[in-house]
Amino acid sequence: MRCHVEQLGLVDYADGLRLQRERVAARKAGIIPDTLLLLEHPHVYTLGRNAKKENLLVNAEELAARGAHVFEIDRGGDVTYHGPGQLVGYPILDLAQHRRDIAWYMRSLEEVLIAVTRDYGLEAGCLAGAPGVWVGNDKLAAMGVHISRWVTSHGFAFNVNTDLRYFDWIVPCGLRDKGVTSLQKLLGRQVEMDEVAEKVVGHFGRVFELEMARGLGTGGWGLGTGELGDSNIGDENARQ
């Protein structure tokens, strides 16, 4: 099967939500194939359906004054941060064409990002009951998804050159005893986003057994761009 890749650069969060809804509707209708959206967002905090407001340590007005906005969204999970230097992936997949198994899907996303991390000589893995990709006690990539009629949206946030200070204003994913990290911090140098995106695309195709087809994006990263009720899977309830 084919998967269309749209690599879009920096995208406003509201525009990213709209784009996901459009792609999900088109995938449900069979108009488009599986699609992987890769992008970055300006500074933003998102609260999943299971989020606890107390995990946002600064109120929305103060965050706005610091150039960051807050969105309440329909993915699973608690509160997380997106910003420049973080590679965000929104897979729009019809799991009915793959495997109708949400736990398998989450594990597969983790496998993709663990493989990318290992490409940089770093050992990453999973923590029981805490979905995402971890290096020791620090989270390198967060995950939270929404699934409607077996079509996926939302996805993962992979810290590449992320300014980790923005995590100081939240309890990331509601986990008070865990830290966050980035490829830049672990390697002691900046990492090319294009290079990371290439590796994500390659491992995504391998893990999901998809032919990755690059299309035309609006950004400029050089790559062209049965019935199930809604499910929201995030950092506290993804592993089954």
Image: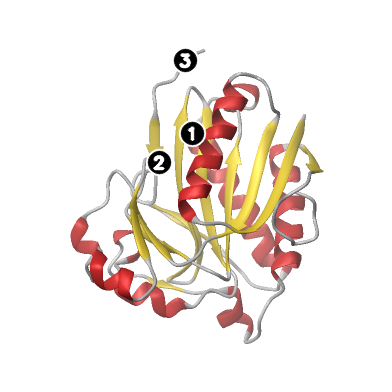
Badge 3: residue crowd in 10 Å (few <14, some 14–19, many ≥20): few
**Is 135 left, or right, of 72 in this rendering?**
right
Q: What's the residue at 25%, 73% (across, down)?
A: 62
How is the structure coloured here?
A: secondary structure
**Residue nearest the viewer, comparing 124 with 197:** 197
**Mark 2 is on which residue type?**
Ile
Residue 163 horizontal/vertical position (percent):
49, 78
Q: What's the residue at 30%, 43% (across, down)?
A: 49
Of the 4 image quadrants, the one containing the N terminus is: top right
Secondary structure at badge 3 equals: loop
What residue would you read off at disc 3?
A: 227
**Is 108 left, or right, of 171 in this rendering?**
right
Residue 90 horizontal/vertical position (percent):
57, 46
Q: Residue furthest bottom?
A: 188
- Looking at marks 3 and 1 on the same chain, the residue that comes earlier in the sequence is marked by 1
**Mark 1 is on which residue type?**
Ile
What residue would you read off at disc 2?
A: 233
**Residue nearest the viewer, comparing 82 with 209:** 82
Q: CA distance from mark 1 to mark 2?
A: 8 Å
Label 1 with label 2: CB-CB less than 8 Å: yes
Secondary structure at badge 1 equals: helix
Secondary structure at badge 2 equals: strand
Q: Let me know if residue 184 appears in the view.
A: yes
- Looking at marks 1 and 2 on the same chain, the residue that comes earlier in the sequence is marked by 1
Badge 1: residue crowd in 10 Å (few <14, some 14–19, many ≥20): many
Q: Is residue 15 above or below residue 84?
A: above
Q: What's the residue at 39%, 27% (across, down)?
A: 230
Q: Let me know if residue 143 appears in the view.
A: no
Disc assigned to residue 102: 1
